[in-house]
């Protein structure tokens, strides 16, 4: 009888949404610096440290005149295998991968849940970088 008069716990989704806490670890995403350049240098540390091996990276060279010599030619994260542990974020020396607040991952096919580089950058967006180590002087 105590449960009948208690607080309502049913949510009318999608009209009502959860408010996630500041320390929530959602899906991993890639970010760009405030000039729109990719921050990832394809060091493959996140791929190495990932326990379920959900990250796949193929290093490649960037266009001429770029301050960074290389970046990822292929960067895929299999969200079906990802356990949202945050080790990739901890291992990244360039602060290029972050755990987002995104918790709604869905797809009609399994292949739609393998996020490629463009999808990860679209989800991550731009994150301001106080240290401008790649700036031209």
Image (spheres, rainbow, N blue to C red):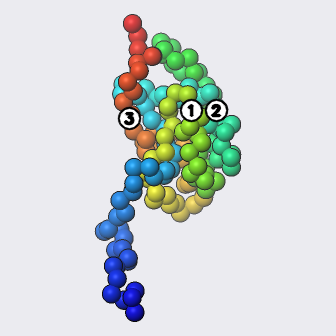
On the image, the x and y values in percent for residue 55 come to 63, 42
Q: Which SS class for mark 1?
A: loop
Q: Which SS class for mark 3?
A: loop
Judge whether 19 appears above or below 124 on screen.
Answer: below
Residue plotted at (50% across, 33% down): 96
Dot 1 or dot 2: first in sequence order is 2
Looking at the rendered image, the disc whose residue lies closer to the viewer, 3 or 1, is 1
Q: Which residue is mark 1?
A: 92
Distance (Cα) linking label 3 and label 1: 16 Å
On the image, the x and y values in percent for residue 90 come to 56, 37
Q: Residue furthest bottom?
A: 1
Depth check: 94 or 41 in front? 94
On the image, the x and y values in percent for residue 95 come to 49, 31
- Whether the residues at callouts 1 and 2 have beta carbons within 8 Å, the answer is yes
Judge whether 113 appears above or below 129 on screen.
Answer: below
Q: Which mark is residue 126?
A: 3
Is residue 75 visible from the viewing direction of this image? no
Q: Which residue is mark 2?
A: 45
Q: Quadrant of the C terminus?
A: top left
Q: Quadrant of the N terminus?
A: bottom left
Q: Is residue 70 left or right of residue 19?
A: right
Residue plotted at (38% across, 76% down): 9
On the image, the x and y values in percent for residue 56 come to 65, 40
Depth check: 10 or 69 in front? 10
């Amino acid at each position: 009888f105590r449960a009948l008069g208690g607080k309502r716990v049913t949510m009318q989704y999608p009209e009502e949404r959860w408010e996630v806490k500041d320390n929530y670890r959602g899906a991993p995403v890639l970010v760009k610096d405030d000039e729109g350049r990719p921050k990832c240098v394809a060091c493959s540390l996140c791929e190495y440290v990932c326990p379920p091996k959900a990250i796949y990276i193929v290093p490649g060279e960037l266009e001429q005149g770029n301050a960074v010599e290389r970046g990822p030619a292929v960067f895929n994260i299999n969200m079906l295998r990802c356990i949202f542990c945050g080790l990739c974020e901890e291992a990244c020396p360039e602060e290029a991968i972050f755990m987002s607040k995104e918790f709604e991952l869905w797809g009609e096919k399994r292949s739609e849940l393998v996020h490629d580089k463009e999808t990860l950058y679209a989800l991550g967006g731009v994150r301001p970088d106080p240290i401008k180590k790649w700036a031209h002087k």
